[in-house]
Amino acid sequence: MNNSELSIMASSEDAFIVPETVNYGTSWDTLSNAGSQTNALSRNESCDNRGTGLECVEEAASHRGRDTQAGAIRPSSEDRQHDLGFWLLHRSADRHDQWERLLRLSQGSVRARQCGLQYSSSVGKRTCDVVGSLFLLLLLLPLFIVVAILIKLDSPGPVFFRHYRIGKDGRRFVLWKFRSMKIDVPEYETSPRSAVDGRLTRIGRLIRRLSIDELPQLINVLKGDMSLVGPRPEMPFIVARYHSVHRERLVARPGITGLWQISPARAFPIHENLQYDLHYIHNQNFFLDCAIIFRTITAVIRGVGAV
């Protein structure tokens, strides 16, 4: 389950308060290199309190360039390579340091980013989405019927839960789920953080534990609102407070699963972990999608991150 979808509280608004000095024109590079820029600025005596933020960054960049020429450590080839997701298939992907390295990776070349965006809109990815969702809907149809019957017998209310979400290019669509909570729970209430939450129905605890409640989103994939793999779609009132760096998530079709969903950071809100979505958007390809789907299946079987 997506623990952040319904976990937005009043304090979440603070996450969208951005200092006016932040330059979003270079959002990914700025975020990725913030630590190194800070160190360079601390060594640069010419960048005092009278200088502007842009001047400080430019001076730090030139200083860092001189350090590199003097023999500083250069970026590894791993930082420049297109991520094919093979590291997700190794046991080392369970270690936090493997995920933390994504915080240090820069956006990479413009060519790599363009390749990722081209794949996002390609006929090949859409064909995989249509064939995959149609196959899974037919395969899981008996399970859908059983779950629907259990939901109706367990508590009054509809079988499906519908939510408005924001998709590619800011378009709003209706997201489908199996209902796992009681009908008197407010639509945008905070998400349950434990299986003993009183808002959950008995069958709701089970289907959330197995992530079965997400399966109706295969209908969204078939309709073209979503993809099998992609950034998680956010709620309209969250997107309304997006800044430029956040809106980069909207250039790709949202997915049922994604890099953030299988990361250790999935316990925290989506908008606090943009680096995973941006890394996927800039590097998305067929092999990375397959690796993410494989990791999702293993996570569901192990019950990782489920409530």
Image: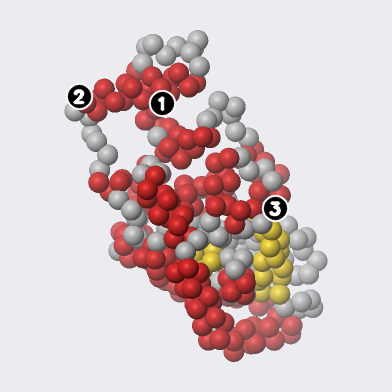
Residue at image position (69%, 58%) is 172
Classify residue 144 by image quadrant: bottom right
Q: Secondary structure at mark 1?
A: helix
Quarter holding the N terminus is bottom right
Residue toward you, 77 or 38? 77
**Secondary structure state at the residue bearing disc 3:** helix
Amino acid found under the numbered disc labelled 1: Thr
Q: Which SS class for mark 2?
A: loop
Q: CA distance from mark 1 to mark 2?
A: 19 Å
Measured as percent of width and height from the top left, residue 259 is found at: 45, 58
The residue located at (42%, 55%) in the rendering is 116
Which residue does the image show at 62% across and 72% down from the upper left?
223
Q: Quadrant of residue 182?
A: bottom right
Image: 85 above or below 111: below
Labels 3 & 2 near each other (Cβ < 8 A): no
What type is the residue that disc 2 sits on? Ala
Residue matched to label 1: 38
Q: Label 2, on which residue?
A: 70
Rendered position, 284 above or below 200: above
What is the residue that sits farthest to the left in this orientation?
71
Q: Mark 2 Cα within 10 Å, few/some/many (few <14, many 20+)?
A: few
Residue 151 percent coordinates (x, y): 70, 80
Q: Earlier in the sequence, mark 3 or mark 2?
A: 2
Residue highlighted by disc 3 = 236
- Above or below for 12 versus 26: below
In x, y percent, where is residue 11? Answer: 67, 42
Q: Mark 1 or mark 2: name the one nearer the start of the chain.
A: 1
Instruction: Please tell me which residue is depicted at 40% across the width and 54% down the height of the picture.
Output: 115
Q: Label 3: few (<14), some or many (≥20) within 10 Å?
A: some
